[in-house]
Image (cartoon, helix red, strand yellow):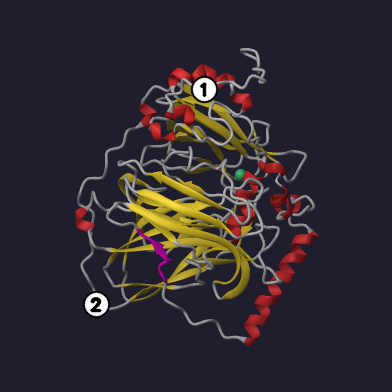
Amino acid sequence: MDLRTDPRLRAGRPDRPSRAPSRSAPGIGLWLFLLLAALPALALAVDAAPPPATALKAPPEFGYGADGVTHATLRASLSPVMVGDQRYTTMVFNGDYDAPLIRTRPGGTIDLTLDNAMAETTNLHFHGMTVTPLDSGDSIFQVTEPSKKTEYRFKLPPDHSPGAYWYHSHIHGGSERQVAAGIAGPILVDGLLDPFPEMKGIKERVLVLRNFQKTLSGKVASEITTSAPSIRTVNGQSQPVIDIQPGETQLWHFINIAANQYFRIRINGQPMQILSRDGNTVNQKLMTEELLIGPSARFSVLVVGPDAGDRAIELGSGNTGAAGDQYRGERLATLRSSGSRVATRQITSPYPVLEDYSKEPVAQVRQFAFQDSATDGDAFLINGERFDPRRVNTTVKLGDLEEWRLYNPSQELHQFHIHQTDFQVIAINGKPVPLTGYRDNVFIPARGSITIRIPFRDPVMLGKFVYHCHILEHEDGGMMQVIQVVRPEDYAQAKRLERLGGIYGDNQTCTYLQNTGRAFQLPSNVQLPAEGAP
Ligand SMILES: [Cu+2]
């Protein structure tokens, strides 16, 4: 179906003026909004003392049994919830702004029911996971209408990389609004510490980072103004306290599930050791005092308890470029060190040895320009075009290593992400980058470029999926394209079918692969473009 013409989706996204003011100098509308949005905060300050600090809660969780199957039901509905310490009515899973954690393991199976009790169409994407995009798997071409359910059931390969992932609405035209409202949650693939037995048993925490638009009505904003005041939460809580003992080593999984916001995080000068980025274990010891966690990114870090006392976990202010968004800084949480000193655990086992794709020949070099439209403040383009789910833009042969050069001619960041596979960043603005690990998202600097290499090697990714900007305002505005990964013997035919939606068809229920691919028939009323036509 054509997602762009779905009336329910449009009903949830009313006609509105151009959003150009939110990306250029703040217009009068934005200032008015800032003023109005500040009012409830002032009222609160007068009649209520600041809420007592509460200990960080772990999210509710769906785990797996001995069979490795995680059964989960996510019921999406408009519900009254607490966002931090404020009451809102918003779209969430299972009646809670703190969305459930889905826990799985390499070789495990996710068996999930999406129960759509909202008044608008939605769907799910399993971000960062190398799983099938076909059938009941991670297909963003599948949608769930209001009052309907969709069953997702797919298996993780036995060598799936452990670490932090997430799930979220990927409904084109409504993803920013739904994800910002609450239609997103964390996933953990167990086993990150398995190669490091000396770390066994340390305390693990999931820190889900979110940004919620403040409104006067107590309802979810129908229109996101990314630079406007918002509530920042960790696991749905406002400024929680995270306990640690002096010397204690903890593993924290930061998961940014905000629709648009970059989180720049510091623990008051305290070093953190990055163990994994986007669910990919790094190949060496990486220390940092600051994490820049872009939209969709995850960092798993080792934190060591400092001397007794409280330390602020600060969110730095942000700025995505002259045409982009500005964010206030604030305290995000407090690290509270107390109790007796314990021995610090250090990694002594070797880090994984990773294949360096920069040293290998590539089968294809492709170039993509991520552009703001010059004429329409709501339009975002890749190579001059807006997203069209009915056609395929890129056809790749399974087994190929490709080099993609990503250009950003605009005056703000774009956040590249590709589904189903990871990649290696080879160069930023033409300057080579040494290999420290793989990732599934990266920002392309304003007026800059990023060069990546993508291994299209795991047969589990056969199918049709997308790559796009993960600033969801831009994705909804059209900064997204369709890719199909096909077997080499099917490449010529798949290429010819690009304009008709590719070899996998509309719903990707893939009899094509199950029956060895030979039974695929072109519909008799279809005219193929001439060979070599643009
Ligand atoms: Cu973008």
In the rendered structure, the answer to whether residue 78 lies left or right of residue 21 reads left
Q: Which residue is nearer to you in this view: 96 or 239? A: 96
Q: Amino acid at mark 1?
A: Phe
Determine the residue positioned at 57% across, 85% down: 49
Q: Which residue is nearer to you in this view: 66 or 185? A: 66
Label 1 beta carbon less than 8 Å to ligand 1: no
Find residue 520 and name its label: 1
Q: Is residue 255 above or below residue 399?
A: below
Q: Secondary structure at mark 1?
A: loop
Query: Where does residue 160 sit, x and y in percent of width and height?
Result: 34, 43
In the rendered structure, the answer to whether residue 189 lies left or right of residue 410 reads left
Q: Which residue is nearer to you in this view: 120 or 297? A: 120
Image quadrant in which you'd find residue 261: bottom right
In the rendered structure, the answer to whether residue 484 lies left or right of residue 527 reads left
Query: Where does residue 480 sit, x and y in percent of width and height?
Result: 60, 38
Q: Residues within 10 Å of mark 1 (few under 14, many from 20)?
A: few
Q: Mark 1 against mark 2, which lies toward the viewer?
A: 1
Q: Which residue is mark 2?
A: 340
Q: Amino acid at mark 2?
A: Ser
Q: Residues within 10 Å of mark 2 (few under 14, many from 20)?
A: few
- Give the extent of the magenta segment: 57-63
Distance, label 1 to label 2, CA atoms, is 67 Å
- Tell me, yes or no, if residue 42 can be seen here: yes
Find residue 36 and name its label: none
Determine the residue positioned at 71% across, 71% down: 217
